[in-house]
Image: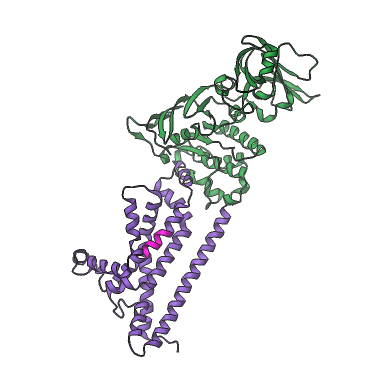
Chain colours: A purple, B green
Amino acid sequence: MFELSPDEWTAVRLSLQIALTATAFSLPFGILAAYALARWTFPGKFLFDGFIHLPLVLPPVVTGYILLMLLGRRAPLGAFLADHFGIVFSFRWTGAALACGVMGFPLMVRAMRLSIEAIDRRLEDAAGTLGANSLWTFGLVTLPLALPGILVGAILCFAKALGEFGATITFVSNIPGETQTISAAIYTYTQVPGGDAKAWRLTAIAIAIALGALIVSEIVQRTAHRRLAQFE
Amino acid sequence: MIRFDAAIKLGAFTYEVAFESAAGVSLFGRSGSGKSVTIALIAGLLRPDRGVIVLDDRVLVDTEKHVFVPKHDRRVGVVYQDAQLFPHLTVRQNLMFGRWFAPRTEQAIAFGAVVETLGIGHLLARRPGRLSGGERQRVAIGRALLASPRLLLMDEPLAALDDERKMEVLTLIERLRDGFKVPIVYVSHSVDEVARIASPVVVFNAGHVVTAGAVDEVFGARRVQAGESRFARSSVLTGRIVGMRADYGLTEIHHPAGTIWIAGPAGSAGREVRVVVRATDVTVSTEPPQHLSIRTVLAGKVAAIDEEDGPLAAVTIDLAGHGHIVASLTRMAVDELGLSVGRPVFALIKTVALDERGIAPAGR
């Protein structure tokens, strides 16, 4: 009963591929944005903060539509990227990854920002007086101490990316083998007669992946807690 | 050599301080008087609105010439009140942190020597979270020292320790200062500590320098004492050890105004020492005392009488030879003895009130 058909497998593989890609590419930008929000003061910080959080409050379909308007093949930015760099997002799995990354970004930044803000600034000052410039201080003090929060942020982004539906389907549609993720596949199967069994199987897999992500995040947090308990 | 002259406004707090020192210097004053701001300015953690800070031949800050050396290029070590060790690194990694960034040619201070002097060899593999307060502070001092700094800033390094640990770490600091030849800027609000560290003292109040000079000149001078609680008021006397009376276990210290007796050993004969005397431990007599248990009697003249609110007065006595001593008396005693400025008096100190915390070899 629990044998997956090739197109179901494809949906599962695509989902994981898209979510992992989205998380991996968001990570450096997420850390940078979180650090900027936690440590720097600059004009327009409030707007920057709001802009990052926009995908969290906007309807996903709206985010997807904005992406389509910006990066669609006939949109100015999309055409420019396609003509000069050969990068195409619309109706490709890379576009799905982009949409998922955008949707997961605020969750990621939030977790990371909190963990960076929790670090005593005087530790960074101490590193400075010991001869470490700001880059070394970041790498040797800030980053390792913020690591639990960074991992949690990455897991949140991954989970969000796995479940993303609205922005993805608006931006890159629902093409089997290219942009059809688990969520999109389930949606498709519920629309056709006799698709219930398939939908059920994918639902079970979605639950398993979600539980797996939750367990990993729990383990990470517990390890972090233990390590912090050891620190103090 | 430190030349410091800086002004900064931090909210409602106005700070304007200037001082110079040939080597180390102690910054003394109550909390909130601007000592820690001075540390932050020298370390490069704060940028002054106006000012010049020069260390040896190197200009660290000159606002007019737009010079501001960033903190990681200053080679100035800082020891904080609460150690601030990196919690995710082992003690060894903490110690090596600054060393790794110091130029090879300037790693004048040997790892083994520091670890041995501080007695932290058995802690190297541990993480800071498992250390006691005293251990943490010793590691923090070692970490700052191993970066081979040109100057070591210590911001109340003993404040978080109990009395016993204080003595222990203070002794280590003295040993490091003399052994590794790093000048120290020492911040404290304790007369005992400042007297032991024994460098020239700059006294702070409300973001300004009140007075500056050698320890025994500064403490005992009226300006420093004004406004302090009578228990916080102390004088510092400098004398020379004559020897030890083995039969009584007392050390005899020569001061031109009289002999100071101290319980227990205080060092070898011929050595100069400083003795911190709390104003509440000083009794004043107008005649040489007889039939009294007091052993330490110092002759001098009343230099000033500061009547305070309420029943108390602070009497400053110029001692014969050199130095001052402050006595906290009741106004009734001042009136009934007929004390007035210029009157010859004797300052009596109970020997048992002097403990080893108040006695320090007079360093450089």
Q: Residue sitting at 41 percent across and 45 percent down? A: A133
* Residue B15 pos. (x, y %): 44, 30
Q: Quadrant of the C terminus of chain B?
A: top right
**Residue B30 vs residue B131, the one in the foreground:** B30
Q: Residue sitting at 51 percent across and 63 percent down? A: A221
Residue B166 in sight from this viewpoint: yes
Left or right, B125 with respect to A153, comes to: right
Left or right, A109 with respect to A230, comes to: left
Tell me the magenta residue range: A104-110
* Residue A21 pos. (x, y %): 36, 68
Prevailing secondary structure class for the magenta stretch in the rendered image? helix
* Residue B97 pos. (x, y %): 49, 46
Tally of marks = 0
In the rendered view, would you say B79 is above or below B216?
below
Residue B325 is inside the magenta segment: no
In the rendered view, would you say A215 is above or below B288?
below
Q: Quadrant of residue A25?
A: bottom left
* Residue A85 pos. (x, y %): 22, 64
Q: Residue sitting at 41 percent across and 59 percent down? A: A110
In the image, farthest residue toward the front: B310
Residue A143 in sight from this viewpoint: no
Q: Quadrant of residue A160?
A: bottom left
